[in-house]
Amino acid sequence: MAFTSINGNVVHYELIGEAKAKNLIVFSNGLGTDFRIWLPLFDELGDDVSVLLYDSRGHGLSGGAEKPFGMADLVSDLAGLCDALGIRKATFCGLSVGGLVCQGLWQARPDLFRKLVLCDTAPRIATAEIWSERMSMIESGGLEAAADGAMQRWFTPVFHEEQKDALAGYRLMMTRQSKAGYLSTCAALRDTDFSAVLPTISVPTLFVVGDQDGSTPPEVVEKGSTLVPGARFEVIEDCAHIPSVEQPEALAALLQDFIRKG
Ligand SMILES: O=C(O)CC1=CCC(=O)O1
């Protein structure tokens, strides 16, 4: 557990291993989550993989929620964190809005990339109307008003049935996020379309999606993958929006294979 200051805000991060390791993976989390969503992966990844986790602005223990922010800020925070830690090159793995942050980072700082993993994400997620509706709902009813819908999209019916304690825990993770931080991140999602950026990606890229993802369904993620020259597309079975939680072994196997090849 470590803290630094980037762009005037405190950033909560954890570097496990070496900043200069060849097998460094930098993970960027999704809306309403913090970096703990990646922890179930680590038993599966192997000792030779170094990892950087961080809480994005307005989420987890990172600051910056009090002033509105957008995608450019989220991208600049990740670039600043990499620079502050002396990271020269890494594989970036972003989930959902974290995947958009990684696409924006490619646009701003391609020098940082060894490889890219885009997990349950797309160049544009949902529509401006959907984000505006969600923001109105949360402005009036708080994060609690959006929590049951989010859990339906995040996890499969089997997870709901068989992992009730974990479901309650992840629901608390969402409802305990900063309302202002969540709303700014929704605005960033509403205003972002990286469709023109994907064709410029020239590092090996892997797209991954859960077969039951309710936020970025497989057909949406597959369509995004066709925009990146030579990209690989994989579907994880029995999984919704957060494979690192619901199918960590399957995601870790894909990551291990991907970072070791080529
Ligand atoms: O729909 C959700 O709540 C999940 C989600 C959409 C964008 C993101 O980062 O998470």
Image (tube, rainbow, N blue to C red):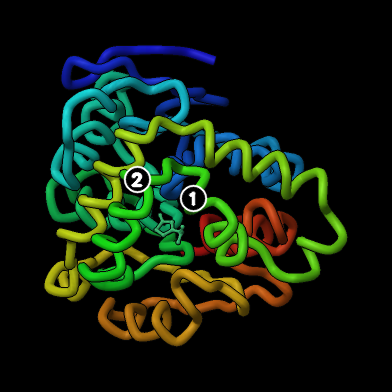
Around disc 2, counting alpha carbons within 10 Å, would you say few (fewer than 14), some (14 to 19), or many (20 or more)? Answer: few
Asked whether, in this view, residue 166 is left or right of residue 13, the answer is right
Question: At numbered mark 1, what does the secondary structure look like: helix, strand or loop?
Answer: helix
User: What's the amino acid at mark 1?
Assistant: Ala
Question: At numbered mark 2, what does the secondary structure look like: helix, strand or loop?
Answer: helix
Q: Are marks 2 and 1 in contact (CB under 8 Å)?
A: yes
Q: Residue shown at 38%/77% (left/top)?
A: 231
Q: Residue furthest front?
A: 140
- Name the spot of residue 181 as percent of width and height, x first: 32, 35
Q: Residue shown at 14%/55% (left/top)?
A: 107
Task: State the residue position of label 1.
Answer: 145
Asked whether, in this view, residue 40 is left or right of residue 107, the answer is right
The quarter of the image that holds ligand 1 is bottom left
Task: Classify 77 as above or below 41.
Answer: above
Of the numbered discs in the image, which one, if any, rests on residue 140?
2
Q: Identify which residue, 256 or 246, lies in the foreground.
A: 246
Of the numbered discs in the image, which one, if any, rests on residue 213?
none
Q: Residue 57 is drawn in which quadrant?
A: top left
Task: Classify 31 as above or below 162.
Answer: above
Q: Quadrant of the N terminus?
A: top right
Queried on whether the Cβ of the residue with tag 2 lies below 8 angstroms from ligand 1, the answer reads no
Around disc 1, counting alpha carbons within 10 Å, would you say few (fewer than 14), some (14 to 19), or many (20 or more)? Answer: some
Q: Identify which residue, 149 or 21, lies in the foreground.
A: 149
User: Cα distance, mark 2 to mark 1?
Assistant: 8 Å
Q: Residue shown at 32%/79% (left/top)?
A: 224
- Name the spot of residue 113 as percent of width and height, x first: 29, 49
Asked whether, in this view, residue 187 is left or right of residue 237, the answer is left
- Name the spot of residue 136 as percent of width and height, x first: 29, 54
- Name the spot of residue 227 as percent of width and height, x first: 26, 81
User: What's the amino acid at mark 2?
Assistant: Ser
